[in-house]
Image (tube, coloured by chain):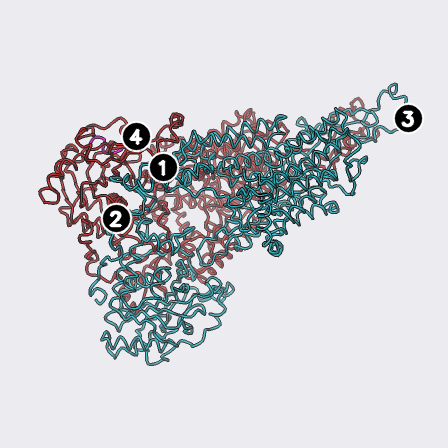
Chain colours: A red, B cyan
Amino acid sequence: GMPTPTLFTEMDTLQHDGEELEWRESARWVKFEEKVEEGGERWSKPHVSTLSLHSLFELRTCLQTGVVLLDLEGYSLPQIVDDIIERQIEEGMIGPELRDKISFVLLRKHRHQTKKPIHRSLADMGKGSSGYFSLCFCCVAGHAQSRSMNDIADTPSTDQLKNKFMKKIPRDAEASNVLVGEVDFLDKPFVAFVRLAQATTLGGLTEVPVPTRFLFVLLGPHGKAKSYNEIGRAIATLMVDDLFSDVAYKARDREDLIAGIDEFLDEVIVLPPGEWDPKIRIEPPKKVLSADKRKSVFSLNELGQMNGSVGGGGGVSEDEEMPVPHELGEELAYTGRFCGGLFLDIKRKLPWYPSDFYEGFHIQSISAVLFIYLGCITNAITFGGLLGDATDNYQGVMESFLGTALAGTVFCLFGGQPLIILSSTGPILIFEKLLYEFSKSNSIDYMELRLWIGMHACAQCLFLVATDASYIIKYMTRFTEEGFSSLISFIFISDAIKKMVGSFKYYPINTEFNPDYVTAYKCECVAPDPSEVWTMNITALDWTQLSKKECVKYGGSLVGKSCKYVPDLALMSFILFFGTYSMTVSLKKFKFSRYFPTKLRKLISDFSIFMSIMTFVGLDMLIGLKTPKLIVPTEFKPTRPDRGWIVMPFGKNPWWVYVASFVPALLVTILIFMDQQISAVIVNRKENKLKKGCGYHLDLFWVGLLMAACSFIGLPWYVAATVISIAHIDSLKMESESSAPGEQPQFLGVREQRMTGILVFVLTGVSIFLAPVLQFIPMPVLYGVFLYMGVASLGGIQFWDRTKLFLMPAKHQPDFTYLRHVPLRRVHLFTLLQIVCLAVLWILKSTFLAIIFPVMILGLMLVRKMLDMVFSQHDLAWLDDLLPEKEKKKKDDEKKNSSSKKDKKKGRVGDDSEDDTYLHTENPISIQYPIYNGKIST
Amino acid sequence: GMPTPTLFTEMDTLQHDGEELEWRESARWVKFEEKVEEGGERWSKPHVSTLSLHSLFELRTCLQTGVVLLDLEGYSLPQIVDDIIERQIEEGMIGPELRDKISFVLLRKHRHQTKKPIHRSLADMGKGSSGYFSLCFCCVAGHAQSRSMNDIADTPSTDQLKNKFMKKIPRDAEASNVLVGEVDFLDKPFVAFVRLAQATTLGGLTEVPVPTRFLFVLLGPHGKAKSYNEIGRAIATLMVDDLFSDVAYKARDREDLIAGIDEFLDEVIVLPPGEWDPKIRIEPPKKVLSADKRKSVFSLNELGQMNGSVGGGGGVSEDEEMPVPHELGEELAYTGRFCGGLFLDIKRKLPWYPSDFYEGFHIQSISAVLFIYLGCITNAITFGGLLGDATDNYQGVMESFLGTALAGTVFCLFGGQPLIILSSTGPILIFEKLLYEFSKSNSIDYMELRLWIGMHACAQCLFLVATDASYIIKYMTRFTEEGFSSLISFIFISDAIKKMVGSFKYYPINTEFNPDYVTAYKCECVAPDPSEVWTMNITALDWTQLSKKECVKYGGSLVGKSCKYVPDLALMSFILFFGTYSMTVSLKKFKFSRYFPTKLRKLISDFSIFMSIMTFVGLDMLIGLKTPKLIVPTEFKPTRPDRGWIVMPFGKNPWWVYVASFVPALLVTILIFMDQQISAVIVNRKENKLKKGCGYHLDLFWVGLLMAACSFIGLPWYVAATVISIAHIDSLKMESESSAPGEQPQFLGVREQRMTGILVFVLTGVSIFLAPVLQFIPMPVLYGVFLYMGVASLGGIQFWDRTKLFLMPAKHQPDFTYLRHVPLRRVHLFTLLQIVCLAVLWILKSTFLAIIFPVMILGLMLVRKMLDMVFSQHDLAWLDDLLPEKEKKKKDDEKKNSSSKKDKKKGRVGDDSEDDTYLHTENPISIQYPIYNGKIST
């Protein structure tokens, strides 16, 4: 049927305020309980309602003996109260003489817990010490006649309407009101459960202007207040239970409600009193079973698995618990048609294209753009500088900026996965270096050769696209992915540290310096021996006025103790580097602190990198030392003056070079293909919950085209950069706004759009004009950001978690699911093998073999294949993923076995199969719960 | 009666291992549940056993229908099994033909979960992929005849005896064994509950060599494994429940056991299924109710207060929840006799005297000594330096070291509270400064005047001791204490930072330095104009060879751009300072990380300061910069050459000075008295759980005597130092070794002894000879330690917690008890008033009024008195403590009210008084729980 509305439950208890009787709100439930701390005049934290078994049984008795009015036509509280009392009198439960008294009590004013503004406290100061002992406890009846019978307004008050708590309640919610209290004129409890035919706003009954659907009233004789409270809490807890509220909405009679309670009792979780203190408020769990799931497993299998199943020693039962296999989906299916994958990619991405733009307009995008932009220009500068060194400035910082901007923008505009960030990568750098050396020593024109290699590689990429070759990515499991991405993270970390250490070499510290002997330190430029430099007219120079560079330039020599030292800069660089890193880490963690409202904390966390950079740029400016700064080219022209923007394909090299360049192009293609697709797999991981699909073929198509384009303009080649892409995704993660108080925000997915990427690269292009601003950023700050990126991208990697297990004693290890299913020594062995693989890769990377680095990833895939011989499929399913054929085989096996399974099971304990049920298999609900006969009426 | 032994419960389930049947351990309980993770082959973390209500009811049915054998004479498992089966046959529950089959099953081998060493994993490698699918599920009966009837050895195996888990089980423990399993030859469950007359070790039945007292067996027909498991977990959880195990030990018949279960059910805590996922393992709570407490409150009042009481609007009920009043005990009682307090102090401390020495021999003492020693010498050097400046070296570093050593050693040997560390303090320093200036300008001999002041002050202190004057400390509440100690902490923090900032002034950085213009930087000593210095024969000097100091000394002038700058030292100092501080903080926190075994972590945490100091001393040595180092005097002689060690009382000043010095002495006495006793109150706080009592009078006695002694030798005066004393206590805190797995270690108290203090001060004295080692410690490292001390001592202060509340939104605030009872705005107001008081004190402290600083603490006590007019006694009881008279008045009020209370309560809901009970007041236990008739036998 129709889904029933969410219920908001408020419990009010009867109180004396001075001489007046009133209903005071004592707790409320959206999903979890929030209690009014009487003394603290505040709401408690939302917590799980811990009930006593008693109160539940007593509630059951109440519903069995009290009045149950279902689908009552109610338009106002007085009328509803009249109806309830009338029915009670009809059924002979109370005498008619109590009518007025009960009605009077039930129509007293309701006082809700609302925030008192802080400035009132000064007004309160005077009355502090008095007032606590002066409450007058007069009995109700005496005043009954003297005041109005009805304190409750018909329309919601402004307090109700202004209540901000409304935000936390779903739009369609209805209220259930629980009223419990002690009175002195009753000698047995007065109980009523009412469901209104239409949800109606009953004046000031509820704290928020939500229409009331249910009403539970319990008035009883004096002396059992605590018991009544507990019963009230029990019904309130039941009302917000998804399954019971469904029952309550649909119940035809009293018996349906009782059955609902029994169902609830059947599912409750019991904590032994000796192991748990009932006073502890239990924090809401991260996740609870949904109502549907609870229905489907209904107290049988799932409850049986309390704390994970006990028993179940062998293999089969556990295999059934194996994790869902790694699904790469249709994106990597082999179509067998020409460009079949590419067309599917376009078909898949096209419908999302408009939303790829308008979904980018969000505050989070700004922080993401800033973060990634800084990463990109740092990368562009670093690689630009290195490329310039390697190629005698044929490709320098200028080319690097331009290329990054061009390739990135085009890719983000048209690529299959716009969350991927293109960048220069290490292997490409090494390739260019070797290529330049080769052409120089063989007198081949480098730029022309490079153009041909680019064109060949482009053609090869297009061939791979046309033949759906990306489907082989399917064979890449977590093992390969994580190996690759850890390696890249380690490279980031080691590069950042190397650069930092480098600055200690670049700015040597004079550790011998003694402040008292400052007079002994100087550095003078001494003119060279005139006999050697007679050809130059330099004798006119004032040698002492020359700077270090000039001195060296004119052939002078630097003499003095302070010549080779640079004070302060190395240490200042270290402070900037380490400060940026650790401030970013702390600010990221700030999200989990208790200070400031959640939104502000999230903002601080999102902008942590930006804020750290600003802070340390500020510190650097304040101190004013000449730390090495970011240098951005300011003029739009190639770095090397003797080359133009366009590279011509013919004329400089012999014809056979055009053909032979096919071979190095093949290497580049493999390199590009692996680098690109592994990064894409990592970005498209299931954990990221991407909804718009990906496009491996489309990605490769554009990377190929861009290679050719970049070759023509003489710009570096670009390919997906793992670490920055992961950072991009991380900065765009979305979490659900927690609705009910206490509910944990859930990771919803990533803000998938093209705007951030495009903006990043447009900004990178514009950076050439931003030089006046960017020149204030010290390089050590950027190295700090690099370090952070490397460390942060290790964070999400299971391999890294497993490595940390080596240092933890078994009993302190986190409760990772795989540790429940795979023996620790097997886990360690797996990790150890991964470490060995990485070590080998790291060593290879440090040699000239770095050029075939991406090819080595193929090696990792081979190693993974061999792991099938060392580890069981069960272990691998938990620690890694199964390889496609294995998976298929596995399913076949299962089919074959399923028929013979039942026989096999005989005599075994602990199977998790579906025919295991409770002892009372026939009808698990039909338990006879005890009835406290007469107990309630004493 | 006698307390019953602790029970260790092990649950074994029947499993097939290949073709063999065996009992495999699946969970165990000391207090909390530890489950065997089958796949992971490991123990889970200890967790609270979450049960289903079903399993408890089913267990109840099992005990009602099964065999219950109490006080069975059992010496071996086969005999016990025979007895059980015999009884079952007798009672007609099973046919005699099943005798052998059941006996065979029950006597199968027991396999316990033990650690497999990691090196075995290599041996396992080969069999990885096979073995999981090859289990053979043969039925039991076919094999029954082919093998021995009894797999169980009579004596414990070596595996059992070597099991390290034994450590976690109390010495007197007995075991209860739960055996559950599915067999195919039964058509209804076979249940037995056995209590042996004597606890007996039944061979390999239990994982540890603990004698078995209870045995629960549940064998049932095939298909309900999960249900059997849950029943097994239920009985196991019951057996480790303190109250039920008592019942089980004393039960006379089946009905007693059933009643025990009912009692248990009466107390259980129920979690609603929609708010909690049963799969979550609940971590053991920090504290659970003890069995006695549970008995006394028995499910009535306490359970009614689940999550704190609901309702209870007014004042009276809350006042009853007021915290225990601040008890200073008999130490501060006013005896009215001459030296009455002093004699009581001696009487109280004397019996502990021997243990004060031998209890000092513990590894923890070493770290405490190192930590406090470093704090003390840093203090001695700092104050020594400052005193030297202030008194023209009449008291310098040498005197400071000697005085610290002398006063500290004597105080720790004979003082009332040897945990207190004596030190120079700020107010004394300021007093000395003013005194020296006064005597200099009035031509009075400083040392002689000081001697007389010291003698007068000593006499005044002794007078205060003789008259028990310390009893006024009673009026010092948390407000005053915390105000004082926060202020001292802030002074520590600000001093450390000031010193650090100072080094930037002392070693100015040349921010204009440009590495390229290094040639432009020099500093030359230029000879003075010869006409001015004609009197001296200095023309012969080579001015360029002079050091900075020499140059200035001979009247030369320093010329050059680099003269006023010192490179690197300031930044290096900052790195050392901040590094030491943050490394100490991180290492302290390391105790809570998951890495390394608990003991190692604790060691790292205990030695965190020492390790940080060593690390940064190492770093400093490695870099080799001339950072400012600790300078320790090396020769044993007064700092000022013109004074001797002994100060003569007569001869230098006119006679009236001897009398008039009574007045400044009075100031010193107040100063000493307040400073000393507040620190003592803070050290003796209830939270520290000191067991050996304290001695305020005795402390003051020694401080007075030491004043006189120090005055005679011309050493500084010493008084208790709050921050270092707190650090001393913190470094000596003891925690219980957690016994049952999952139980939280409890803070037990402080290692109260005199050894650490004595060692610290002896070492301080010896430090004069340790100069060659100590000279490697850079001062910034010590400032870092200072900063840490200041910040750490803020940690335990409630005032500081409350200040932090200002920055937290109400819903994120921690669940402090006072927040449940006092409205937030009142809490904020209280904190705000405290902040204002501190600000005023801080400002006064920065003026010449600093000398009356301890007198201002009296002002704080006055302010506290006035707070009685602003805040209610209820609020103050939570936020502060009540003042003694108020407390007394309070009690009187209560007595008066108690008679009239019952009348007042009429018609009120939510009172917490004792006559509030459950609805079924008559006999809360006599609930008829349902019996699942026939369900168990299907």
Q: How far apart are marks 4 and 1 (CA)?
A: 22 Å
Left or right: B650 in relation to A568: right
Q: Quadrant of residue B60?
A: bottom left
Q: Position of residue B301 (x, y in %)?
A: 32, 48
**Tag in front: 3 or 4:** 4
Left or right: A112 in relation to B320: left
Going by the numbered disc 2, the residue's amino acid type is Asp
> Disc 4 on helix, strand or loop?
loop
Q: Name the residue under label 2.
A: A292
Report if the CB atoms under discs 2 and 3 are less than 8 Å apart. Answer: no
Report if the CB atoms under discs 2 and 4 are less than 8 Å apart. Answer: no
Q: Position of residue B901 (x, y in %)?
A: 31, 41
Q: Name the residue under label 3.
A: B537
Report if the CB atoms under discs 4 and 1 are less than 8 Å apart. Answer: no
- Stretch in magenta: A202-207
> Disc 3 on helix, strand or loop?
loop
Q: Position of residue A631 (x, y in %)?
A: 58, 29
**Tag in front: 2 or 4:** 4
Q: How far apart are marks 2 and 3 (CA)?
A: 104 Å
Q: Where is residue A145 in the image (x, y as percent from the top left)?
A: 16, 30
Q: Residue A39 carries which label?
A: 1
Q: Distance between the residues labelled 3 and 1?
A: 86 Å
Going by the numbered disc 3, the residue's amino acid type is Asn
**Tag in front: 3 or 1:** 1
**Tag in front: 2 or 1:** 1
Pinpoint the chain carrying mark 4.
A
Q: How far apart are marks 3 and 4 (CA)?
A: 91 Å
